[in-house]
Image: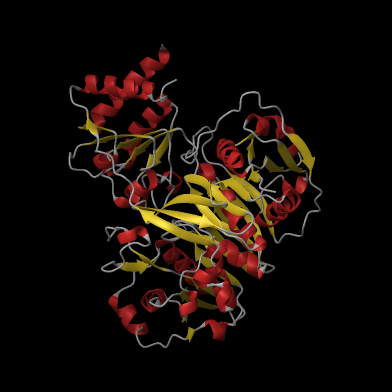
Amino acid sequence: MPGILVFCETKDGKLKKVSREALSIGRKLAEKTGGDLAAVVVGSQAASLAADAGHYGAKKLYAVESAALDSYTTGQTTAAVKQAVDDFKPSVLLMGGTSNGRDLAPRLAARLGVGVASDVDQLDWTDGKLRARRSIYSGKVFGRVEISGTPAIATTRPNAFSAEVVAGGGAADVVKVSFTPVEVKSKLLETKTPEAGELTIAEADIIVSGGRGLKEAQNFSYIRDLAHAIGGAVGASRATVDAGWIDHQHQVGQTGRVVSPNVYIAAGISGAIQHLAGMSSSKHIIAINKDPEAPIFRVADLGVVGDLFTILPALTEEVKKAKAH
Amino acid sequence: MEILVCVKRVPDSAENEISVAAGGADIRRDDLVYSVNEWDNYAVEEAIQIAERAGGNVTVVSVGADAEEVVRREMAMGAGQGVLLNDAAFEGSDGLGTATILKAAAQKNKYDLILTGAQADDGAGQVGGMLAALLDWPYASLVNRIEEKEGNQLRVGREIEGGSQEVSDIELPCVLSIQTGINEPRYVGLRGIRKVASVEIPVLDASALGVSADAVGAAGAKVKRVDYFVPEIGAGAEMIEGSTEEVATKLVDLLKAKGGIK
């Protein structure tokens, strides 16, 4: 069966954006393979996602309904998705490149004896094989890989593919997957969430990032003010994280998070290669720096040479005005 | 606690301009500066700290013909043993191939815990999860906290989206992939390097490991490189000039146009 199966994650009773993106590229691949697009969702409410998955092109929804799957553990989720793979027998298995997607894919691949392309930003079906493009060596080079074995597995980089609603896409047909929970040797105790309401850089549409040009920790308020006004997330360069100005969770770059938001604003960031590796695939990049020679201007679409301490507050005010209209 | 840490020798992306060799089949590898994968330093540091607290030994293992230098460097941090896995048949291994080789090495000894870096130079982040699956051990990725617990368990924190941290109890033996920021890797001075310079590091090949040559290397790879290419770098930024107000207005116009302000 030349079908495409997409492992979809949920949040607040909806499919995650990155899962919708994976469904959308999955639908394009299915057109080429001539197979069906199906989603697999796990957890006690799995079947309730049928309409959501249908909007993004899934014809079937494999629902693995078990309370044991309501929180993620590598072992349990691997067993559940493997069952859906055994039932549907897809040619390609996709999942969003989230923390959990990237945790799950390798274990599942080893179980199935197949290969994985991680964090891909292009996918195609060529000569009966899945081809993927990935950015490697800190984004200095792209590599194209071909994945053999069935199913070929890939995790998709968040924001790299667009999530497209299919006109007239009705609810997916629910296929219940029979599943007996396996014994797992790890147990989730709790999830600690920092300051509520703070948007995360991994899935944000807009990121405002600060670097050493902020001079000291308290000046991150300039970044936060603009981010809050726009409704974006706060990012940071490695230097500021290493200096203890802001938590590691905000770090954009090779050793932090690789992000590709719609708009990335870099203020006071010179653009060390390790930072560029984490953000250069953003759709639109705006750089504000006092040094006209800063490498960040080479990857930016728009640049402003100047003092961020005057430009950021002015920009924050203008954004507030524009939003008030 | 017997701890195995898997490390990789990688081109140092901060030190190198990386370019693609003619034909696009590989990057140009002559003149590259290599170092140990950054994440692995955190994994080795964490292993040493656990052994210091709980007792035990740390062994560093690496796959590849030229890995001795990085294994020695990590031993200089304080790991007691090193092992090199090298065979012509290992060349061109994909993630699953590398995990297959490491699994064979892990089974040569009775380890309680295996640590890897969360990812390496190619950003795939696969080997730890695959190794755990092949060993049928529990696994957690992106680990940013480890505590020993009673009853042969560890309490671990995982870095997930949104700066959230998942806290789990995981049974030993297990495989953990270590995220940067979990600790501060110690400095390795010249003296440390000298101290381990003459320590013998065993080298195991495919037959010593009992690994079938067609299951690993280019022959066994399920993920094959088609080509490499250098991303097109844009023309550079269009520079906005003018007074602060003018600049702010232009930026807001752009944000509106690109959907930044709805």
Residue drawn at 67 percent across, 49 percent down: A90
* Residue sitting farthest toward the top: A325
Dividing the picture into quarters, in which one does residue A149 lie?
bottom right
Q: Does residue A30 appear to the left or right of A194 in the view shown?
A: right
Relative to B247, is A239 above or below? below
Q: Does residue B71 appear to the left or right of B106 in the view shown?
A: left
Residue drawn at 39 percent across, 62 percent down: B38
Nearer to me, A145 or B204: A145
* Residue sitting farthest toward the front: A127
Q: Quadrant of the C terminus of chain A?
A: top left
Residue A222 at x, y percent in the picture: 33, 32
Residue B215 at x, y percent in the picture: 58, 73
User: Quick check: can you spot residue A181?
Assistant: yes
Relative to A262, is B17 above or below? below
Residue drawn at 30 percent across, 74 percent down: B189
Q: Does residue B171 appear to the left or right of A178 in the view shown?
A: left
Dividing the picture into quarters, in which one does residue A37 lie?
top right
Relative to B56, is A83 above or below? above
Residue A132 at x, y percent in the picture: 49, 50
Residue A194 at x, y percent in the picture: 52, 41
